[in-house]
Image: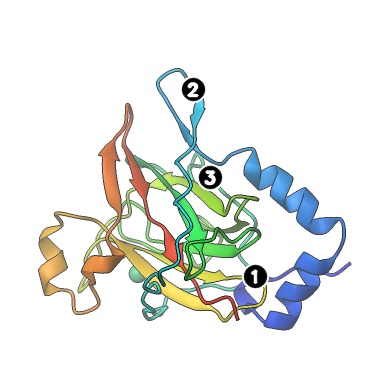
Amino acid sequence: MARFVPSAFSRRRFLSAVSTATVPVLFLSRVRSVFGRRDENGSVQLEPTPAVGDDDLQLTPEETAGPFFRPDSPAKTNFREPSVTGVPVNVSGCVLDRRGKPIAGALLDFWHADSDGHYDFDGYRCRGHQFTDANGRYLLETIMPGLYPSRTRHYHVRLQAAHGPILTTQLYFPGEPRNSDDFLFRRNLLLTMRGAKEGWNATFNFVLKTS
Ligand code: FE
């Protein structure tokens, strides 16, 4: 079976991947095992799932992918490899539809600069994709991205629900001096940051179109 290539984000490939009987189960079981935050004792602490309501939620804004996207990222929920050093950040949250219903099996493809502000074009450091679990949750264990000229601090991510369009966007950090000077910065793409024993826990809930 051909390997799923998330960076292409073609609907045909995505649907092919999630409709194959065994593949989603395998993917989701792997991803689910690492969802949630770890407390001081190493136990995983899951974020509460947002309540489903009648009101339409505001869709997560679209932003440019920029010039540093690289196709064919590997399945990876932990970017903290030996060659990736920096302040740890665990980014977690839910992917929801406009009614607040969690989207299981949504694809997220993250990429960002390393702590020195460099993107990896030779390999896939700080690049990887994953799928939300049965409750629409995701978790990326990574580092604080470094700054590079003309931009404030940010993560990049592309998302897609099984029957929905691609959303490309970016996530920002509160209190960054460059936020006010970066024309791409949007307040409604700010992460919520909480200090952790080592580094930070950052949360963000995405709201996607599903058709
Ligand atoms: Fe960037």
Residue identified by numbered label 3: 78
Q: Say which label, 3 or 2, has the lower sequence index.
A: 2
Query: Could you give the CA–CA distance between mark 1 and mark 3, rounded to whole angstroms?
Result: 17 Å
Instruction: State the image coordinates of residue 171 (x, y, percent, origin top left).
Output: 34, 63
* Colouring scheme, one of rainbow, by chain, secondary structure, one colour: rainbow
Which residue is situated farthest in the front direction here? 54
Which numbered marker is on residue 6?
1
Q: Is residue 28 above or below residue 44?
A: below
Instruction: State the image coordinates of residue 151 (x, y, percent, origin top left).
Output: 23, 70
Query: Could you give the CA–CA distance between mark 3 and mark 2, rounded to whole angstroms?
Result: 16 Å
Which of the two discs, 3 and 2, sits closer to the camera?
Answer: 2
Query: Label 3 is placed on what type of residue?
Result: Asn
Q: Name the image quarter holding the C terminus.
A: bottom right
What residue is rendered at 57% in x and 81% in y? 165
Mark 1 residue element? helix
Quarter of the render that holds ligand 1: bottom left
Query: Label 2 is placed on what type of residue?
Result: Gly
Question: In this orientation, does residue 81 appear?
Answer: yes
Instruction: State the image coordinates of residue 137 (x, y, percent, origin top left).
Output: 54, 50
Q: Say which label, 1 or 2, has the lower sequence index.
A: 1
Instruction: State the image coordinates of residue 210 (x, y, percent, origin top left).
Output: 58, 75
Q: Mark 1 near mark 2, Cβ–Cβ under 8 Å? A: no
Is disc 3's CB within 8 Å of ligand 1?
no
